Amino acid sequence: MPTVTIRLDEETDARLKRRLARSGETLSGFIREAVTKHLDAKPRVETRLADLTRVLEKLTDTGEADLGALVEQAPKGCEVWLDGGHNAEGGRVVAAALGDLEERVSRPLVVIVGMMGNKDANAFLANFAGLTRHIIAVQIPDRDHAMPLDRLADAVRQLGMRVETAPGVEAALRSLAGLAYEVPPRILITGSLYLAGHVLAANGTPPR
């Protein structure tokens, strides 16, 4: 069994000692419980993502005939995920969930992203740098303060990822459908709650 060394600052060490004194737990028992809770929590991160995308995720996985007007444009057999994250922390959570999915079932990941102009695109997209090299930047429709495509594309390039632009999500999905994939891709549509709302409306699958 490997040896694990845990280094604590003085304040955390004191809090831990007080906790153990109150509860009567052993240190090894406390650590075992904490690790177990952490491992058990990992699927809940994925569940959070699935909750946010329950309509599209369910439709792309159940083989129903009517996937929705928008998802029908995507490559056959792909997964379509939708998330409203738009900041660094939101990107971290989604990237972690997708990383777990990749370990279980490997698929090429494509990120379709649209953001508002007041968001930090670099901080958000940096979370996906190790997961994908293919990003399609799209404009959020009907939003005067949406981030311009050239600015969003520049943010992607600064992170060393390949970027294409498309006028909208539907056009982005159609462009992917024209590519040859050995394994159908996993597609994440993300970057804005406004974009997520538009996608659900355009797909004919409003949140329930």
Image (tube, grey):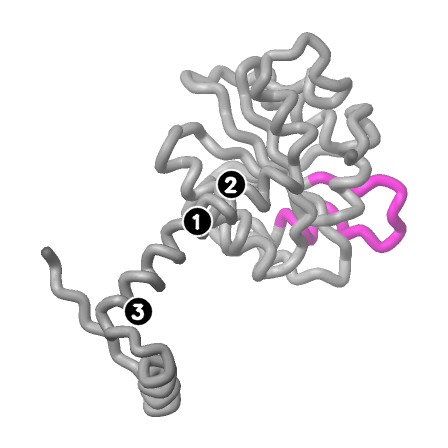
Residue 30 bears which disc, if any?
3
Q: Does 150 lie within the magenta span?
A: yes
Q: Which residues are magenta?
A: 138-153
Residue lying at the far left in this picture: please name it.
1
Residue 87 bears which disc, if any?
none
- For label 2, the residue is 162
Q: Earlier in the sequence, mark 2 or mark 3?
A: 3
Is residue 155 shown left or right of residue 143?
A: left
Could you say whether the residue bearing mark 2 is in a helix, strand or loop? Answer: strand
Q: Earlier in the sequence, mark 1 or mark 2?
A: 1
Q: CA distance from mark 2 to mark 3?
A: 45 Å
Q: Residue at x 78, y 32 (%)?
A: 200
Estimate the x, y position of residue 108 in percent, counting from the top left: 45, 30
Tell me the crowding category of disc 3: few under 14, some 14 to 19, or many 20 or more residues within 10 angstroms, Cα based: some
- For label 1, the residue is 42
Q: CA distance from mark 1 to mark 3?
A: 19 Å
Residue lying at the far top in this picture: please name it.
65
Quadrant (top left, top right, bottom left, bottom right) of the N terminus? bottom left
The image quarter in which residue 8 lies: bottom left
Could you say whether the residue bearing mark 1 is in a helix, strand or loop? Answer: helix
Circle nearer the viewer, 1 or 3: 3
Front residue (pair 105, 121): 105
Q: Residue at x 41, y 16 (%)?
A: 182
Disc 2 + disc 3, Cβ < 8 Å: no
Estimate the x, y position of residue 186 in percent, counting from the top left: 52, 29
Circle nearer the viewer, 1 or 2: 1
Is residue 89 shown left or right of residue 139?
A: left
Relative to 197, residue 13 above or below: below
